[in-house]
Image (cartoon, grey):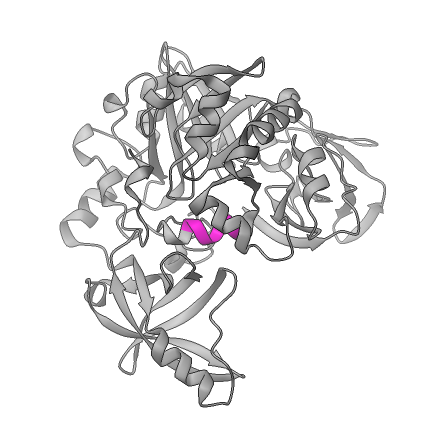
Protein backbone atom coordinates (compact mmCIF):
# COMPACT_ATOMS: atom_id res chain seq x y z
CA UNK A 1 0.00 0.00 0.00
CA UNK A 2 1.03 3.57 -0.36
CA UNK A 3 2.79 4.59 2.85
CA UNK A 4 4.24 8.03 2.17
CA UNK A 5 5.18 10.51 -0.53
CA UNK A 6 8.59 12.01 -1.22
CA UNK A 7 10.19 14.65 -3.38
CA UNK A 8 13.77 13.70 -4.23
CA UNK A 9 16.20 16.15 -5.81
CA UNK A 10 17.22 13.40 -8.21
CA UNK A 11 16.13 9.82 -8.88
CA UNK A 12 18.95 8.25 -6.92
CA UNK A 13 17.31 5.14 -5.52
CA UNK A 14 18.63 2.13 -7.44
CA UNK A 15 16.54 -0.66 -8.87
CA UNK A 16 17.78 -3.42 -6.61
CA UNK A 17 16.55 -5.88 -4.05
CA UNK A 18 18.33 -4.21 -1.18
CA UNK A 19 17.22 -1.64 1.33
CA UNK A 20 19.49 0.42 3.53
CA UNK A 21 18.37 1.73 6.88
CA UNK A 22 19.08 2.10 10.57
CA UNK A 23 18.59 -0.88 12.85
CA UNK A 24 16.94 -0.11 16.17
CA UNK A 25 17.16 -2.47 19.12
CA UNK A 26 15.04 -1.64 22.18
CA UNK A 27 15.18 2.04 21.30
CA UNK A 28 18.94 2.26 20.66
CA UNK A 29 20.56 2.82 17.28
CA UNK A 30 22.92 -0.07 16.65
CA UNK A 31 24.47 0.83 13.33
CA UNK A 32 23.45 3.60 10.93
CA UNK A 33 24.94 1.62 8.05
CA UNK A 34 23.14 -1.67 8.64
CA UNK A 35 22.46 -3.28 5.28
CA UNK A 36 19.49 -5.62 4.96
CA UNK A 37 19.87 -8.02 2.08
CA UNK A 38 16.48 -8.73 0.50
CA UNK A 39 17.00 -11.95 -1.43
CA UNK A 40 14.19 -13.69 -3.31
CA UNK A 41 14.04 -16.51 -0.78
CA UNK A 42 12.06 -16.82 2.41
CA UNK A 43 14.78 -15.38 4.69
CA UNK A 44 16.75 -12.20 4.91
CA UNK A 45 19.92 -11.40 6.81
CA UNK A 46 21.31 -8.24 8.32
CA UNK A 47 25.01 -7.95 7.62
CA UNK A 48 26.85 -7.95 10.90
CA UNK A 49 24.15 -10.11 12.49
CA UNK A 50 21.32 -12.42 11.61
CA UNK A 51 17.58 -12.60 11.95
CA UNK A 52 16.77 -16.19 12.74
CA UNK A 53 13.51 -17.41 11.32
CA UNK A 54 12.79 -14.11 9.61
CA UNK A 55 9.88 -14.42 7.22
CA UNK A 56 10.07 -12.73 3.84
CA UNK A 57 6.46 -11.72 4.21
CA UNK A 58 7.38 -9.10 6.81
CA UNK A 59 10.91 -8.18 5.75
CA UNK A 60 11.24 -8.55 2.02
CA UNK A 61 8.93 -5.69 1.10
CA UNK A 62 10.28 -3.06 3.49
CA UNK A 63 7.82 -0.23 3.95
CA UNK A 64 9.10 3.07 5.25
CA UNK A 65 8.95 2.96 9.01
CA UNK A 66 9.63 0.39 11.74
CA UNK A 67 9.27 -3.26 10.75
CA UNK A 68 9.65 -5.99 13.33
CA UNK A 69 12.57 -8.36 12.92
CA UNK A 70 12.40 -10.33 16.11
CA UNK A 71 13.37 -7.76 18.74
CA UNK A 72 15.06 -5.49 16.19
CA UNK A 73 13.51 -3.10 13.72
CA UNK A 74 14.74 -2.00 10.33
CA UNK A 75 13.73 1.32 8.79
CA UNK A 76 14.17 0.86 5.07
CA UNK A 77 14.59 3.30 2.25
CA UNK A 78 12.18 2.45 -0.60
CA UNK A 79 13.86 1.10 -3.69
CA UNK A 80 13.20 1.34 -7.40
CA UNK A 81 11.01 -1.05 -9.35
CA UNK A 82 12.43 -2.88 -12.38
CA UNK A 83 11.13 0.04 -14.48
CA UNK A 84 12.77 2.71 -12.31
CA UNK A 85 15.46 3.68 -14.81
CA UNK A 86 12.70 4.61 -17.26
CA UNK A 87 10.16 6.14 -14.88
CA UNK A 88 12.75 8.27 -13.08
CA UNK A 89 13.98 9.76 -16.34
CA UNK A 90 10.42 10.89 -17.16
CA UNK A 91 9.34 12.07 -13.70
CA UNK A 92 9.52 15.86 -14.07
CA UNK A 93 7.62 16.43 -10.82
CA UNK A 94 10.18 14.55 -8.70
CA UNK A 95 7.17 13.37 -6.72
CA UNK A 96 7.50 9.79 -5.56
CA UNK A 97 5.34 7.52 -3.47
CA UNK A 98 6.25 4.50 -1.37
CA UNK A 99 4.20 1.48 -2.43
CA UNK A 100 5.12 -1.63 -0.46
CA UNK A 101 8.72 -0.51 -0.21
CA UNK A 102 9.05 0.52 -3.85
CA UNK A 103 9.23 3.97 -5.39
CA UNK A 104 6.47 4.77 -7.86
CA UNK A 105 5.73 8.15 -9.39
CA UNK A 106 2.95 10.21 -7.82
CA UNK A 107 2.75 12.10 -11.10
CA UNK A 108 5.18 12.59 -13.94
CA UNK A 109 4.13 16.15 -14.66
CA UNK A 110 3.63 18.84 -12.03
CA UNK A 111 -0.13 18.25 -12.14
CA UNK A 112 -1.77 14.89 -12.96
CA UNK A 113 -4.62 16.08 -15.21
CA UNK A 114 -3.01 15.07 -18.52
CA UNK A 115 -2.13 11.67 -17.11
CA UNK A 116 -5.70 11.15 -16.00
CA UNK A 117 -7.04 12.22 -19.41
CA UNK A 118 -4.70 9.70 -21.06
CA UNK A 119 -6.44 6.94 -19.09
CA UNK A 120 -9.85 8.07 -20.32
CA UNK A 121 -9.06 9.33 -23.84
CA UNK A 122 -5.95 7.61 -25.21
CA UNK A 123 -3.64 5.29 -23.29
CA UNK A 124 -1.68 5.46 -20.05
CA UNK A 125 1.15 3.22 -18.94
CA UNK A 126 1.39 2.64 -15.18
CA UNK A 127 4.07 0.79 -13.24
CA UNK A 128 2.26 -1.72 -11.00
CA UNK A 129 5.26 -3.94 -10.23
CA UNK A 130 4.93 -3.54 -6.42
CA UNK A 131 1.89 -5.85 -6.41
CA UNK A 132 2.53 -9.06 -4.49
CA UNK A 133 2.43 -12.18 -6.63
CA UNK A 134 2.18 -15.77 -5.42
CA UNK A 135 2.16 -19.04 -7.36
CA UNK A 136 0.36 -22.02 -5.84
CA UNK A 137 1.11 -25.50 -7.18
CA UNK A 138 0.68 -29.08 -6.08
CA UNK A 139 -1.95 -31.79 -5.82
CA UNK A 140 -4.07 -29.67 -3.48
CA UNK A 141 -3.48 -26.24 -5.04
CA UNK A 142 -7.15 -25.88 -5.99
CA UNK A 143 -8.29 -26.94 -2.53
CA UNK A 144 -5.99 -24.42 -0.87
CA UNK A 145 -6.98 -21.42 -2.97
CA UNK A 146 -10.68 -22.33 -2.95
CA UNK A 147 -10.49 -22.72 0.82
CA UNK A 148 -9.06 -19.21 1.21
CA UNK A 149 -11.08 -17.05 -1.20
CA UNK A 150 -14.81 -16.32 -1.21
CA UNK A 151 -15.32 -16.93 -4.95
CA UNK A 152 -16.07 -20.39 -6.35
CA UNK A 153 -12.92 -21.32 -8.24
CA UNK A 154 -14.65 -24.34 -9.78
CA UNK A 155 -16.13 -21.74 -12.15
CA UNK A 156 -12.72 -20.26 -13.01
CA UNK A 157 -11.43 -22.03 -16.11
CA UNK A 158 -7.81 -22.23 -17.25
CA UNK A 159 -6.82 -18.87 -18.69
CA UNK A 160 -9.40 -17.03 -16.60
CA UNK A 161 -8.96 -14.53 -13.73
CA UNK A 162 -11.38 -13.67 -10.94
CA UNK A 163 -11.44 -10.75 -8.54
CA UNK A 164 -12.05 -11.84 -4.97
CA UNK A 165 -11.63 -10.95 -1.31
CA UNK A 166 -10.42 -13.47 1.26
CA UNK A 167 -11.45 -13.48 4.89
CA UNK A 168 -10.44 -14.50 8.39
CA UNK A 169 -12.50 -16.86 10.53
CA UNK A 170 -14.76 -13.99 11.58
CA UNK A 171 -15.68 -13.29 7.96
CA UNK A 172 -13.68 -10.04 7.82
CA UNK A 173 -11.62 -9.23 4.74
CA UNK A 174 -7.92 -10.00 5.04
CA UNK A 175 -7.28 -8.53 1.59
CA UNK A 176 -8.65 -8.48 -1.93
CA UNK A 177 -7.01 -9.22 -5.25
CA UNK A 178 -7.08 -11.53 -8.23
CA UNK A 179 -6.74 -15.29 -8.66
CA UNK A 180 -5.52 -16.70 -11.96
CA UNK A 181 -6.08 -20.25 -13.18
CA UNK A 182 -2.72 -20.95 -14.83
CA UNK A 183 -3.78 -24.41 -15.98
CA UNK A 184 -2.31 -27.78 -15.03
CA UNK A 185 -3.58 -27.33 -11.48
CA UNK A 186 -1.57 -24.15 -10.79
CA UNK A 187 -2.82 -20.75 -9.65
CA UNK A 188 -1.49 -17.24 -9.18
CA UNK A 189 -2.73 -14.81 -6.56
CA UNK A 190 -1.99 -11.08 -6.75
CA UNK A 191 -2.62 -8.63 -3.93
CA UNK A 192 -1.63 -5.26 -2.54
CA UNK A 193 -0.75 -6.66 0.90
CA UNK A 194 1.70 -9.47 1.83
CA UNK A 195 -0.09 -12.82 2.09
CA UNK A 196 2.63 -15.49 2.02
CA UNK A 197 2.30 -16.46 5.68
CA UNK A 198 -1.50 -16.41 5.44
CA UNK A 199 -1.45 -18.78 2.47
CA UNK A 200 1.10 -21.08 4.09
CA UNK A 201 -0.90 -21.27 7.32
CA UNK A 202 -4.11 -21.91 5.38
CA UNK A 203 -2.43 -24.77 3.54
CA UNK A 204 -1.49 -26.76 6.63
CA UNK A 205 -2.09 -30.44 5.89
CA UNK A 206 -2.46 -29.92 2.15
CA UNK A 207 -0.12 -30.97 -0.64
CA UNK A 208 0.40 -27.47 -2.01
CA UNK A 209 3.44 -25.25 -2.47
CA UNK A 210 3.19 -21.46 -2.24
CA UNK A 211 5.98 -19.51 -3.92
CA UNK A 212 6.44 -15.76 -3.64
CA UNK A 213 7.37 -14.61 -7.14
CA UNK A 214 6.89 -10.91 -6.45
CA UNK A 215 10.54 -10.02 -7.06
CA UNK A 216 10.74 -12.06 -10.25
CA UNK A 217 7.84 -10.52 -12.17
CA UNK A 218 7.51 -6.91 -13.31
CA UNK A 219 4.07 -5.61 -14.23
CA UNK A 220 3.01 -2.75 -16.46
CA UNK A 221 -0.60 -1.60 -16.79
CA UNK A 222 -1.65 -0.27 -20.19
CA UNK A 223 -5.03 1.42 -19.73
CA UNK A 224 -7.32 3.48 -21.94
CA UNK A 225 -9.33 3.37 -25.16
CA UNK A 226 -6.29 3.01 -27.46
CA UNK A 227 -4.58 0.34 -25.33
CA UNK A 228 -5.85 -2.52 -27.50
CA UNK A 229 -4.60 -0.85 -30.69
CA UNK A 230 -1.15 -0.50 -29.14
CA UNK A 231 -1.03 -4.16 -28.17
CA UNK A 232 -2.29 -5.16 -31.61
CA UNK A 233 0.77 -3.46 -33.09
CA UNK A 234 2.95 -5.40 -30.64
CA UNK A 235 1.21 -8.79 -30.55
CA UNK A 236 -0.91 -8.98 -33.67
CA UNK A 237 -4.62 -9.63 -34.04
CA UNK A 238 -4.77 -12.26 -31.28
CA UNK A 239 -5.17 -9.51 -28.68
CA UNK A 240 -8.58 -8.64 -30.14
CA UNK A 241 -9.87 -12.03 -29.05
CA UNK A 242 -8.78 -11.62 -25.43
CA UNK A 243 -11.89 -11.39 -23.28
CA UNK A 244 -12.41 -9.44 -20.07
CA UNK A 245 -10.58 -11.02 -17.11
CA UNK A 246 -8.73 -13.52 -19.30
CA UNK A 247 -5.02 -13.76 -20.08
CA UNK A 248 -2.83 -14.94 -22.92
CA UNK A 249 0.83 -15.62 -23.64
CA UNK A 250 2.76 -13.78 -26.31
CA UNK A 251 6.04 -12.18 -27.27
CA UNK A 252 6.57 -8.44 -27.30
CA UNK A 253 9.72 -7.41 -29.14
CA UNK A 254 11.13 -10.86 -28.41
CA UNK A 255 10.19 -10.75 -24.72
CA UNK A 256 8.04 -13.55 -23.34
CA UNK A 257 5.01 -11.87 -21.77
CA UNK A 258 1.71 -12.70 -20.13
CA UNK A 259 -0.99 -10.18 -21.05
CA UNK A 260 -4.17 -9.97 -18.97
CA UNK A 261 -7.34 -8.02 -19.68
CA UNK A 262 -7.38 -6.49 -16.22
CA UNK A 263 -6.76 -3.15 -14.56
CA UNK A 264 -7.57 -0.74 -11.75
CA UNK A 265 -9.03 2.10 -13.82
CA UNK A 266 -12.49 0.85 -14.79
CA UNK A 267 -11.68 1.33 -18.48
CA UNK A 268 -10.55 -0.76 -21.40
CA UNK A 269 -7.15 -1.93 -20.29
CA UNK A 270 -4.52 -4.61 -20.04
CA UNK A 271 -1.65 -5.58 -17.75
CA UNK A 272 1.64 -6.97 -19.03
CA UNK A 273 3.60 -9.37 -16.82
CA UNK A 274 7.20 -10.13 -17.72
CA UNK A 275 10.46 -11.33 -16.12
CA UNK A 276 11.83 -8.48 -14.02
CA UNK A 277 15.15 -8.47 -15.87
CA UNK A 278 13.32 -7.67 -19.13
CA UNK A 279 11.47 -4.64 -17.78
CA UNK A 280 13.49 -1.93 -19.52
CA UNK A 281 13.24 -3.27 -23.10
CA UNK A 282 9.54 -3.99 -22.53
CA UNK A 283 8.95 -0.38 -21.46
CA UNK A 284 10.82 0.87 -24.53
CA UNK A 285 8.80 -1.34 -26.88
CA UNK A 286 5.45 -0.31 -25.40
CA UNK A 287 6.29 3.40 -25.44
CA UNK A 288 7.50 3.22 -29.05
CA UNK A 289 4.38 1.37 -30.21
CA UNK A 290 2.16 3.71 -28.21
CA UNK A 291 3.56 6.98 -29.52
CA UNK A 292 1.15 7.19 -32.49
CA UNK A 293 -1.71 6.37 -30.12
CA UNK A 294 -1.05 9.13 -27.58
CA UNK A 295 0.53 6.98 -24.87
CA UNK A 296 1.44 8.79 -21.65
CA UNK A 297 3.09 7.52 -18.45
CA UNK A 298 0.72 7.98 -15.52
CA UNK A 299 1.36 8.03 -11.79
CA UNK A 300 -0.59 7.16 -8.68
CA UNK A 301 -2.54 10.43 -8.52
CA UNK A 302 -4.14 9.80 -11.90
CA UNK A 303 -4.72 6.16 -11.01
CA UNK A 304 -6.44 7.16 -7.77
CA UNK A 305 -8.90 9.40 -9.64
CA UNK A 306 -9.67 6.65 -12.14
CA UNK A 307 -10.22 3.96 -9.52
CA UNK A 308 -12.62 6.19 -7.55
CA UNK A 309 -14.63 6.81 -10.72
CA UNK A 310 -14.68 3.04 -11.18
CA UNK A 311 -15.90 2.54 -7.60
CA UNK A 312 -12.88 0.36 -6.78
CA UNK A 313 -11.79 0.05 -3.16
CA UNK A 314 -8.32 0.70 -1.78
CA UNK A 315 -7.09 -1.21 1.25
CA UNK A 316 -5.94 0.96 4.16
CA UNK A 317 -8.15 3.75 2.78
CA UNK A 318 -11.69 2.53 2.12
CA UNK A 319 -11.33 -0.49 4.38
CA UNK A 320 -8.69 -1.85 6.75
CA UNK A 321 -7.38 -5.39 6.20
CA UNK A 322 -8.39 -7.39 9.26
CA UNK A 323 -4.81 -8.25 10.22
CA UNK A 324 -3.97 -4.54 10.44
CA UNK A 325 -7.14 -3.46 12.22
CA UNK A 326 -6.73 -2.15 15.76
CA UNK A 327 -10.41 -2.10 16.73
CA UNK A 328 -13.38 -4.14 15.56
CA UNK A 329 -14.97 -1.18 13.77
CA UNK A 330 -12.03 -1.12 11.35
CA UNK A 331 -12.73 -4.66 10.13
CA UNK A 332 -14.98 -5.09 7.10
CA UNK A 333 -16.77 -8.10 5.69
CA UNK A 334 -17.28 -8.49 1.93
CA UNK A 335 -20.95 -7.66 2.49
CA UNK A 336 -20.02 -4.41 4.24
CA UNK A 337 -17.71 -3.68 1.30
CA UNK A 338 -20.73 -4.16 -1.02
CA UNK A 339 -19.00 -7.15 -2.60
CA UNK A 340 -21.93 -9.53 -2.13
CA UNK A 341 -21.47 -10.82 -5.69
CA UNK A 342 -18.03 -12.21 -4.77
CA UNK A 343 -19.29 -14.42 -1.92
CA UNK A 344 -20.22 -17.96 -3.02
CA UNK A 345 -21.84 -19.31 0.13
CA UNK A 346 -23.06 -22.40 -1.75
CA UNK A 347 -19.62 -23.61 -2.85
CA UNK A 348 -18.87 -25.44 0.39
CA UNK A 349 -16.48 -24.75 3.26
CA UNK A 350 -14.10 -21.81 3.09
CA UNK A 351 -12.46 -19.56 5.65
CA UNK A 352 -15.04 -17.26 7.22
CA UNK A 353 -18.08 -18.99 5.68
CA UNK A 354 -20.04 -19.61 8.94
CA UNK A 355 -19.77 -15.94 9.90
CA UNK A 356 -20.73 -14.82 6.40
CA UNK A 357 -23.75 -17.15 6.33
CA UNK A 358 -24.99 -15.51 9.52
CA UNK A 359 -24.30 -12.01 8.21
CA UNK A 360 -26.13 -12.78 4.96
CA UNK A 361 -29.13 -13.87 7.03
CA UNK A 362 -29.31 -10.76 9.22
CA UNK A 363 -27.82 -8.23 6.77
CA UNK A 364 -24.64 -6.16 7.16
CA UNK A 365 -24.76 -3.22 9.58
CA UNK A 366 -23.12 -0.87 7.08
CA UNK A 367 -22.23 -0.57 3.41
CA UNK A 368 -19.57 1.08 1.29
CA UNK A 369 -21.54 3.21 -1.16
CA UNK A 370 -21.10 5.94 -3.72
CA UNK A 371 -22.03 9.53 -2.91
CA UNK A 372 -22.48 12.50 -5.20
CA UNK A 373 -21.91 15.93 -3.70
CA UNK A 374 -24.32 18.72 -4.62
CA UNK A 375 -21.62 20.97 -6.04
CA UNK A 376 -23.92 23.94 -6.55
CA UNK A 377 -24.52 24.12 -2.81
CA UNK A 378 -20.90 23.33 -1.95
CA UNK A 379 -19.75 26.14 -4.26
CA UNK A 380 -21.99 28.62 -2.44
CA UNK A 381 -20.23 27.79 0.82
CA UNK A 382 -17.03 29.16 -0.70
CA UNK A 383 -18.75 32.14 -2.29
CA UNK A 384 -20.24 33.12 1.07
CA UNK A 385 -16.68 33.53 2.35
CA UNK A 386 -15.65 35.53 -0.70
CA UNK A 387 -13.66 32.62 -2.14
CA UNK A 388 -13.86 31.18 -5.64
CA UNK A 389 -15.38 27.68 -5.68
CA UNK A 390 -12.60 25.15 -6.07
CA UNK A 391 -13.27 21.41 -6.32
CA UNK A 392 -10.43 19.12 -5.23
CA UNK A 393 -7.72 19.01 -7.89
CA UNK A 394 -6.51 15.56 -6.86
CA UNK A 395 -8.15 12.62 -5.15
CA UNK A 396 -8.22 12.81 -1.37
CA UNK A 397 -8.03 10.05 1.24
CA UNK A 398 -9.29 10.88 4.72
CA UNK A 399 -12.15 10.20 7.11
CA UNK A 400 -14.89 12.81 6.64
CA UNK A 401 -18.13 12.64 8.68
CA UNK A 402 -21.43 12.02 6.89
CA UNK A 403 -24.72 12.98 8.56
CA UNK A 404 -28.44 12.32 8.42
CA UNK A 405 -29.91 15.30 10.20
CA UNK A 406 -28.04 15.71 13.49
CA UNK A 407 -26.86 12.11 13.52
CA UNK A 408 -23.55 10.95 12.07
CA UNK A 409 -24.33 7.84 10.01
CA UNK A 410 -20.99 7.19 8.38
CA UNK A 411 -17.78 8.56 6.95
CA UNK A 412 -16.41 9.32 3.54
CA UNK A 413 -13.02 7.70 2.89
CA UNK A 414 -11.95 8.90 -0.55
CA UNK A 415 -13.23 11.27 -3.19
CA UNK A 416 -12.38 13.42 -6.18
CA UNK A 417 -13.74 15.78 -8.75
CA UNK A 418 -14.37 13.65 -11.85
CA UNK A 419 -13.12 15.52 -14.93
CA UNK A 420 -15.03 13.11 -17.17
CA UNK A 421 -18.34 13.19 -15.32
CA UNK A 422 -18.02 16.80 -14.14
CA UNK A 423 -19.20 15.67 -10.73
CA UNK A 424 -17.79 15.55 -7.20
CA UNK A 425 -17.88 11.87 -6.26
CA UNK A 426 -17.09 10.09 -3.01
CA UNK A 427 -16.74 6.57 -1.60
CA UNK A 428 -18.15 6.27 1.91
CA UNK A 429 -19.10 3.78 4.62
CA UNK A 430 -22.72 4.38 5.61
CA UNK A 431 -24.96 2.64 8.16
CA UNK A 432 -27.27 0.27 6.28
CA UNK A 433 -30.55 2.07 7.12
CA UNK A 434 -29.18 5.14 5.30
CA UNK A 435 -27.33 3.38 2.46
CA UNK A 436 -30.21 2.91 0.02
CA UNK A 437 -29.91 4.51 -3.40
CA UNK A 438 -31.34 8.00 -3.46
CA UNK A 439 -30.95 8.66 0.27
CA UNK A 440 -30.21 12.33 0.94
CA UNK A 441 -27.38 12.91 3.43
CA UNK A 442 -24.87 15.63 4.26
CA UNK A 443 -21.06 15.52 4.20
CA UNK A 444 -18.80 17.76 6.21
CA UNK A 445 -16.70 20.21 4.22
CA UNK A 446 -14.16 22.66 5.57
CA UNK A 447 -14.05 26.21 4.21
CA UNK A 448 -11.26 28.40 5.58
CA UNK A 449 -11.07 26.29 8.72
CA UNK A 450 -14.82 26.37 9.34
CA UNK A 451 -16.86 23.18 9.33
CA UNK A 452 -19.80 23.27 6.96
CA UNK A 453 -22.09 20.68 5.42
CA UNK A 454 -22.89 19.99 1.79
CA UNK A 455 -25.78 17.82 0.55
CA UNK A 456 -24.83 14.40 -0.83
CA UNK A 457 -26.94 11.65 -2.36
CA UNK A 458 -26.34 7.90 -2.39
CA UNK A 459 -25.83 6.96 -6.04
CA UNK A 460 -24.93 3.75 -7.91
CA UNK A 461 -21.32 2.76 -8.37
CA UNK A 462 -19.29 2.48 -10.41
CA UNK A 463 -19.73 6.14 -11.15
CA UNK A 464 -18.09 5.60 -14.55
CA UNK A 465 -18.53 2.35 -16.47
CA UNK A 466 -17.88 2.67 -20.23
CA UNK A 467 -19.10 -0.19 -22.46
CA UNK A 468 -15.60 -0.54 -23.95
CA UNK A 469 -14.30 -1.87 -20.62
CA UNK A 470 -15.75 -5.32 -21.33
CA UNK A 471 -16.31 -5.08 -25.09
Which of the 4 image quarters holds residue 228? top left
In this rendering, would 91 be left or right of 444? right
Q: Residue furthest front?
A: 292
Location of residue 78 with respect to 49 vertically, above or below? below
Instruction: Kindly tell me whether residue 205 is visible in this rendering.
Output: no
For image coordinates 42% across by 84% down, the residue present is 381
Of residues 11 and 5, the one nearer the viewer is 11
- Point out residue 163 in the picture as x, y percentages from the top left corner: 34, 35
Q: Is residue 452 above or below residue 366?
A: below
Residue 77 colored magenta? no
Quadrant location of the C terminus? Answer: top left
For the view shown, which residue lies furthest in the left direction?
361
Is the residue 84 above or below the residue 445 in the image? above
Task: Locate residue 354, reporting x and y percent.
Answer: 22, 40
Residue 112 spot, x, y in % from top left: 56, 54
Q: How many marks?
A: 0
Position of 41 with respect to 433 (left or right) is right
| Residue 428 spot, x, y in % from top left | 35, 62
Q: Is residue 200 visible?
A: yes
Q: In front here: 100 or 385?
A: 385
Q: Please tell me which residue lies in front, 206 or 285.
A: 285
249 and 367: which is toward the camera: 249
Give the extent of the magenta segment.
302-307
Residue at the image point whose x is 65% and y is 34% from the top? 81
Q: Quadrant of residue 403?
A: bottom left
Residue at the (22%, 68%) spot, across then down: 434
Instruction: Specify the quadrant of the image occupied by residue 21.
Output: top right
Residue sitting at x 22%, y 41%: 341
Magenta stretch: helix, strand or loop mostly: helix
Amino acid sequence: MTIASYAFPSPIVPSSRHCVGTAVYRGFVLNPFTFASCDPGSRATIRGGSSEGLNRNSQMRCALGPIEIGEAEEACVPRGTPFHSRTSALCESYGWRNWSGYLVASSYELVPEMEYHAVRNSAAVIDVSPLYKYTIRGEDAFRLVNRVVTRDLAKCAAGQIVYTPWCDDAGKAVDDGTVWNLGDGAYRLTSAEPNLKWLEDSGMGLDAEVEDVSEDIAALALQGPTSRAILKDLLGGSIEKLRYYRFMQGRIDGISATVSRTGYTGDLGFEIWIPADRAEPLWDAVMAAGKPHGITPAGMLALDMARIEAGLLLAEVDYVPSRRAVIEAQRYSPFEMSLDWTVALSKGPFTGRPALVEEARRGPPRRIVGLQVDWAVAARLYEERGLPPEPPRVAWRSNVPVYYGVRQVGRATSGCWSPTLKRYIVLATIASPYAALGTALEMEVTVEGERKRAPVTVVPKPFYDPPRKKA
